[in-house]
Image: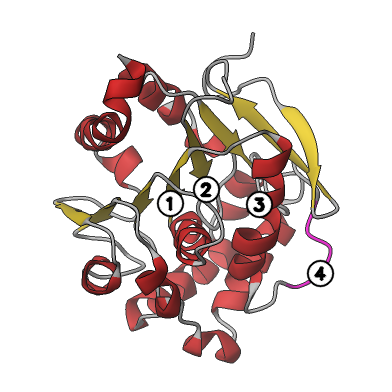
Amino acid sequence: MAPADRPDMQYLTAAGRRLEYYWTAPYDSDGPALVFLHEGLGSAGLWRGFPAMLTAATGLPALVYSRYGYGGSDVLEAARGVDYMHTEALETLPVIRDALDLDDVILVGHSDGGSIAAIHAGAGQYPVRGMILEAPHFFVEDASIAGIEDAKTAYETTDLPARIGRHHIDGDRTFRGWNDIWLSPDFRSWNIEEYLSGITCPTLVIQGVDDEYGTEDQPAAIGRQSLGPVDAVMVPDCGHAPHRDATDGVLEVMADFAVALTGDELA
């Protein structure tokens, strides 16, 4: 058995792409499951032990997978389009859910993964019991662009390429695929607020006060527009990855939210 931060991967094909995934615990298709959706430079492995910790705290099995272009999934073949998160939410994720019998889910999305979760739930085509969104983006802010410009500078002047390369088959394509589209002039008008009014499930939004890619305007947007209840938590002394920067507190908040949605069924 692989260690918690290097789990044994399985593979499936979705939307014509081979994707890696793993489960934190055996999954019974009659019950609810967590589905982890990683950030723009993340992967299944880069969640490290956090999904297993949330499973232990809630009793819920978690599906953790790497999207196309990330981790050990198929390498990105072409530049990403402005609609790449829509494609993930409306085309790829439904295929994954169907292939793995994921009828009852709580989506756990970080950054790009949070945006994908919001589109998927807000489209109103797929049942979603609840969402946990870490540092999601619903529109592009000046802070987002500044943070991504800083990431480009770091990639060109530090050992960041080597560090990214340890976690993806082709780290350069992974980085460029994310960085180039976010810095494209066409992306400046990207906005998914139209999906927020279609969200009816309970949502927990967690954002670091010192998030280098977004501000409190993001959780405020979903709180104002979602038709489901929204609980927003701003984490002090925390950047863009609350589950890494403030693990214990974030784990407790996430677990409480998930158990409140599923407690009676898991008792």
> SS of the residue at dot 1?
strand
Amino acid carrying label 2: it is His
Q: Is residue 71 magenta?
A: no
Amino acid carrying label 1: it is His
Asked whether disc 2 touches disc 3, contact meaning CB atoms under 8 Å apart, the reply is no
In primary-sequence order, the first of circles 1 and 2 is: 2
> SS of the residue at dot 2?
loop
User: Label 4 vs label 3: CA separation?
Assistant: 22 Å
> SS of the residue at dot 4?
loop
> SS of the residue at dot 3?
helix
Could you say where residue 118 lies in the image, as x and y percent from the top left? 44, 62
| Magenta stretch, main secondary structure class | loop
Quadrant occupied by the N terminus: top right
Asked whether disc 1 touches disc 2, contact meaning CB atoms under 8 Å apart, the reply is yes
Q: Which residues are magenta?
A: 75-79
Amino acid carrying label 4: it is Ala
Residue on which disc 1 sits? 110
| Occupied quadrant, residue 138 | bottom left
In primary-sequence order, the first of circles 3 and 1 is: 3
Amino acid carrying label 3: it is Pro
Residue depicted at 64% across the width and 40% down the height: 167
Could you say where residue 115 lies in the image, as x and y percent from the top left? 46, 63
Could you say where residue 256 lies in the image, as x and y percent from the top left? 22, 32
Residue depicted at 61% across the width and 48% down the height: 164
Q: Residues within 10 Å of mark 2 (few under 14, many from 20)?
A: many
Could you say where residue 246 lies in the image, as x and y percent from the top left? 24, 39
User: Label 2 vs label 4: CA separation?
Assistant: 20 Å
Quadrant occupied by the C terminus: top left
Residue on which disc 4 sits? 78
Residue depicted at 38% across the width and 18% down the height: 59
Asked whether disc 1 touches disc 4, contact meaning CB atoms under 8 Å apart, the reply is no
User: Label 1 vs label 2: CA separation?
Assistant: 5 Å
